[in-house]
Image (tube, rainbow, N blue to C red):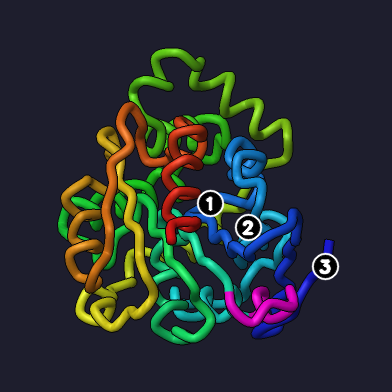
Amino acid sequence: MPTITRDGLTIDYSVSGEGPPLLIISGLSAERSFWALTRPLLSGFTLIEFDNRDIGKSARAKAPYAVADMAGDALAVLAASGFQKAHVMGHSLGGMIAQELALMAPEKVDRLVLTNTIARNDLYTTEIMRLLKELRLQLDNELTFGAALTTFVIGMRMLKTVPLFAAVQQSLDAGLYQEKDAFLRQLDACVAYDGLKRIGDIKAPTYVIYTDDDRLFSPAMVREVAEAIPGAQIDEIIDSGHCPMVEAPQNFATVVRAFLTAR
């Protein structure tokens, strides 16, 4: 896989498919394999995917960083891919990165998709992030921590049909693992982000997606993002938790494709 180096960190990325370019930005503790179920449903686009710093095949940071630093990584990946401009789609923390990217380099963004993301933390999300931080600090068993994290990000419909611990063990067996320090650095960047007063300056046509069973970022918090961006469209995907690209990939890909291809 090709790589770029920024801030002394190697960022691993891939380019696949044909058609208009779509830069995909993953969220907290998620590498690009997270999009495996949705990827084939986005045929007709050139998919530019990468692992954020501190996850997957990209380098581990040596110091704290901000969402703006991660947006700079994304812009560097876009430049290395050979495209001057692309649609940008970000999920969760990746949605915060996408917001920041659209503010930093509006000329690089064609259309913007923000899914299950927020523009600031409130008391609820701050306390949930604090809980996740304490769990990561205190739990050395990767299976137990992975199961705890999954209960926050996967909706009830899937949790009732997929054995929780078996699914997490399968992920660990496949090498989907993030070191404790790396997780905490990403989490701290997420907690510190506050773009609500600035995202009204986003110029790109924007599509915001929320889900009915998101227990991490509530529909109300996601709607706040849409309300702050002039002209933003908003849609709901039902029967899904925080990760519709995993829990409802067909529905997710359908609405994303409709927005990106609309005349």
The residue to which callout 2 is attached is 55
Choose between 214 and 163: the one closer to the eye: 214
Taking the spot 51% from the left edge, 15% from the top edge, the residue there is 163
Choose between 90 and 262: the one closer to the eye: 262
For the record, the magenta segment spans 76-85
User: Measured along the vertical axis of the image, is residue 91 above or below residue 255?
Assistant: below
**Residue 15 in the image, given as x and y percentages of width and height:** 75, 61
Mark 1 to mark 3 CA distance (whole Å): 21 Å
Does 257 sit left or right of 231 as displayed?
right
Taking the spot 53% from the left edge, 67% from the top edge, the residue there is 87
Residue 64 appears in the rendering: no
Mark 1 to mark 2 CA distance (whole Å): 7 Å
Does 162 sit left or right of 126 as displayed?
right
Mark 2 to mark 3 CA distance (whole Å): 16 Å
The residue to which callout 1 is attached is 29
Is 148 in the magenta?
A: no
The residue to which callout 3 is attached is 2
Choose between 44 and 48: the one closer to the eye: 44
**Residue 142 in the image, given as x and y percentages of width and height:** 57, 37
Callouts 1 and 2 close, C-beta under 8 Å? yes
Q: Earlier in the sequence, mark 1 or mark 2?
A: 1
Binning the other alpha carbons within 10 Å of mark 3 as few (below 14), some (14 to 19) or many (20 upward) gives few
